[in-house]
């Protein structure tokens, strides 16, 4: 059960949707702890969260790099030492690159697949154990609508997210009875620096609107949330498309 | 009509982004080409993702934030805590960086001056590529050229400003009707002698003895005991869903609209306790209000006529406007106080007049004619609202230009920072 104010760890809160989620949580009074790669960036984001509400506590930070699994356990330990037992763990960090770039650069492709799937799953495993050990909690992880169908434009990135979504569904089935709520967020196109410079499709949303839906999904213990909302409808139809149609489509 | 093509690239890491893109664009509320790329440039750095608050001291009100933080967000976070921007323009959809670059002024200019007066420090990515911290005492030349410098000395990465303490979340607003231009100016002057916030609206289509009739608004922050227990709620936001067809914006429509405003504010005036947004940002309540001007759009024109030039000058300017068919929904007058420290800062003691100008084939000629009056009176124009002023006209009204360009040259020796506006007005 999540009590308020909740103890929250966010991995990836310095940018984009993670920044927006952390801000909304801090503003409603949750106690937030930030994990990320770059200590200087973490400090600036921690100062931002603290400045946003009167009388807010210091926001703790610790280094945690999805490329280096050896950082995971220490980072979570630091968070739990600072906050006490964790209620919510949010993971928004991930890598993105266009299919063309990934095809040209095999090292980058390997790194992206490792970070977005294997290492993210390993981080979630550690977080899951801690949440269950204190009697349950919420694990909210950002996957993507790119993982719903194999598509020409996002073969590799989509595959990494498909794996992640599959893992999160499995977790939900296996551990919900033990009190672990898994929230798999599937953002559609959201205008953040990750998607900057890409052509903007219809139904593009902004990070804060996504954050609002994500908080709502966490509060209502929803296992899957599409954001912005229109993408639930879009993806419903895309999932139904037969293969021979998908093969002809160029998106 | 001039057309500028370009694209904006945004990143949370503004410092890195601006290594390659030296011209910044915030929320794009300048009415002209100040934040549009120069001819042959294509990309521009969007600042709005760089929006973190880096520190706030509730004892002193001193806030440091990244340049892309919006005033809307600042108000949302700090108004409930009893702090407010020391100076506010007429919209909250602007960034801190933009407020510095335009050295914005507001209804309290006669008391508080421009935004730049309250800025303590800036960090700037200069055209030469360095990140420089500046203040009145530290690289003062860069500081004063950046205040009101339209982003041409460098990208404003962070702003440190002292917020003002406010006693409540409400404003006491009074309005008074004035029957002609003399009455309007008198009412504005006497209001400013006693009230911290003032501005006037005038009906620019009324002619003859009614020329310059209007309504003068005055306001002050309400004391806590004046505010009714139920919080001041905001009226529901309206929206203009589509571009309004051009024929709708004809002189008769504007005439009717102006008459309605004039009569709405009754003969005896009105006093009310309102939400600060109602008083300070009336147009923000109508989303996409600029669509009222149709697909051809509009620009604005704002100038200040110095105190010495007298009322006849105001009348002359208004009659040029009326004669040349510059049907403006909103004509706003404001008495300006002391000049700011920014080398190109707009306000100076006198009367500022701001008008909307729907884009038509004759708009360039209208702006030229208005500028000739301004030059003759020794006034100047506001760059944040300018799209059409000619280079020779700007040079004639800006004796401070050489000093500004010298500082600009020093910090950007290779002339990397250029906007469509800077090329139009300064040649680079």
Image (cartoon, coloured by chain):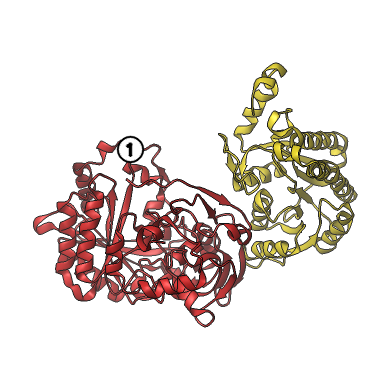
Chain colours: A yellow, B red
Judge whether residue B274 can be spotted in this image.
no
Q: How many marks?
A: 1
Q: Residue at label 1?
A: B244
- Report whether B296 appears left or right of B231: left
- Report whether A86 appears left or right of B113: right
Q: Is residue A194 above or below residue B126?
A: above
| Quadrant of the drawing holding the C terminus of chain A | top right
**Residue placed at 58% from the left, 69% from the top?**
B64
Q: Position of residue B179 (x, y in %)?
A: 15, 60
Task: Indicate the quadrant where residue B392 lies.
Answer: bottom left
- Report whether B224 appears left or right of B354: right
Task: Indicate the quadrant where residue A85 lies.
Answer: bottom right
**Residue placed at 72% from the left, 56% from the top?**
A5
Q: Position of residue A229 (x, y in %)?
A: 61, 35
Name the one closer to the observer, B91 or A204. Answer: A204
Determine the secondary structure under disc 1.
loop
Q: Position of residue B156 (x, y in %)?
A: 53, 65
Label 1 marks which chain's residue? B
Q: Residue furthest left?
A: B208
Q: Residue furthest bottom?
A: B137
Name the one closer to the observer, A143 or B47. Answer: B47
**Residue placed at 60% from the left, 41% from the top?**
A198
Q: Is residue B82 above or below residue B341?
A: above
Judge whether residue B394 can be spotted in this image.
yes
Q: Position of residue B160 (x, y in %)?
A: 55, 71
Task: Indicate the quadrant where residue A59 lies.
Answer: bottom right
- Assess disc 1: are there few (<14), some (14-19) or many (≥20) residues with their C-alpha within 10 Å of its C-alpha: some
Name the one closer to the observer, A144 or B320. Answer: B320
């Amino acid at each position: 059960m999540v009590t308020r104010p909740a103890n929250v760890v966010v991995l990836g809160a310095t940018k984009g949707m993670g920044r927006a989620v952390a801000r909304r949580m801090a503003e409603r009074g949750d106690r937030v702890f930030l994990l990320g790669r770059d200590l200087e960036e973490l400090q600036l984001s921690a100062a931002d969260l603290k400045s946003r509400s009167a009388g807010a506590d210091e926001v703790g930070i610790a280094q945690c790099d999805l490329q280096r699994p050896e950082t995971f356990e220490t980072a979570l330990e630091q968070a739990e030492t600072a906050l006490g037992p964790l209620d919510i763990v949010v993971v928004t960090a991930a890598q993105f690159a266009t299919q063309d770039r990934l095809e040209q650069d095999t090292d980058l492709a390997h790194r992206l697949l490792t970070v977005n799937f294997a290492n993210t799953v390993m981080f979630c495993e550690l977080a899951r154990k801690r949440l269950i050990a204190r009697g349950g909690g919420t694990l909210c992880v950002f996957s993507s609508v790119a993982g719903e169908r194999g598509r020409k434009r996002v073969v590799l990135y989509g595959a990494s997210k498909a794996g992640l979504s599959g893992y999160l569904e499995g977790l939900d089935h296996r551990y919900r009875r033990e009190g672990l709520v898994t929230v798999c967020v599937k953002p559609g196109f959201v205008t953040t620096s990750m998607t900057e410079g890409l052509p903007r499709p219809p139904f593009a949303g902004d990070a804060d609107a996504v954050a609002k839906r994500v908080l709502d999904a966490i509060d209502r213990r929803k296992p899957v949330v599409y954001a912005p909302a229109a993408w639930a409808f879009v993806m419903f139809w895309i999932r139904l498309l037969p293969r021979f149609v998908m093969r002809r489509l160029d998106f | 009509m001039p057309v500028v093509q370009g694209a904006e690239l945004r990143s949370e890491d503004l410092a890195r982004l601006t290594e390659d893109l030296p011209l910044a664009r915030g929320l794009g509320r300048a009415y002209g080409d100040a934040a549009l790329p120069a001819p042959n440039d294509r990309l521009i750095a969007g600042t709005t993702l760089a929006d973190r608050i880096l520190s706030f001291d509730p004892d002193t009100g001193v806030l440091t934030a990244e340049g892309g933080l919006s005033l809307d967000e600042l108000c949302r976070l700090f108004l409930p805590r009893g702090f407010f921007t020391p100076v506010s323009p007429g919209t909250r959809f602007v960034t801190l960086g933009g407020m510095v670059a335009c050295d914005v002024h507001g209804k309290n200019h006669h008391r508080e001056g421009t935004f730049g007066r309250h800025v303590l420090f800036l960090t700037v990515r200069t055209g030469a590529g360095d990140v420089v911290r500046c203040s009145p005492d530290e690289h003062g030349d860069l500081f004063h050229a950046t205040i009101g410098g339209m982003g041409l000395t460098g990208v404003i990465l962070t702003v440190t400003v002292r917020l003002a303490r406010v006693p409540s979340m409400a404003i006491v607003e009074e309005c008074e009707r004035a029957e002609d231009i003399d009455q309007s100016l008198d009412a504005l002057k006497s209001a400013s002698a006693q009230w911290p916030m003032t501005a006037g609206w005038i009906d620019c289509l009324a002619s003859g003895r009614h020329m310059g009739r209007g309504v003068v608004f005055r306001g002050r922050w309400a004391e806590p005991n004046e505010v009714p227990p139920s919080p001041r709620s905001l009226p529901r936001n309206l929206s203009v869903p589509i571009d309004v067809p051009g024929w709708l914006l004809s002189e008769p429509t504007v005439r009717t609209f102006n008459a309605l405003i004039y009569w709405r504010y009754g003969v005896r005036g009105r006093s009310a306790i309102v939400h600060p947004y109602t008083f300070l940002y009336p147009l923000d309540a109508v989303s996409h209000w600029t669509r009222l001007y149709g697909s051809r759009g509009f620009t604005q024109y704002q100038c200040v006529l110095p105190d010495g030039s007298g009322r006849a000058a105001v009348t002359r300017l208004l009659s040029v406007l009326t004669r040349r068919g510059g049907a403006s929904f909103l004509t706003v007058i404001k008495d300006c106080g002391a000049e700011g420290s920014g080398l190109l800062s707009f306000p100076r003691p006198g009367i500022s007049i701001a008008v909307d100008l729907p884009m038509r084939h004759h708009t360039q000629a209208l702006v030229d004619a208005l500028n000739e009056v301004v030059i003759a009176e020794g006034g100047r124009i506001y760059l944040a609202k300018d799209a059409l002023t000619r280079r020779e006209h700007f040079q004639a009204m800006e004796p401070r230009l050489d000093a500004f360009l010298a500082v600009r040259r020093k910090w950007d020796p290779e002339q990397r920072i250029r906007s469509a506006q800077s090329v139009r007005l300064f040649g680079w």
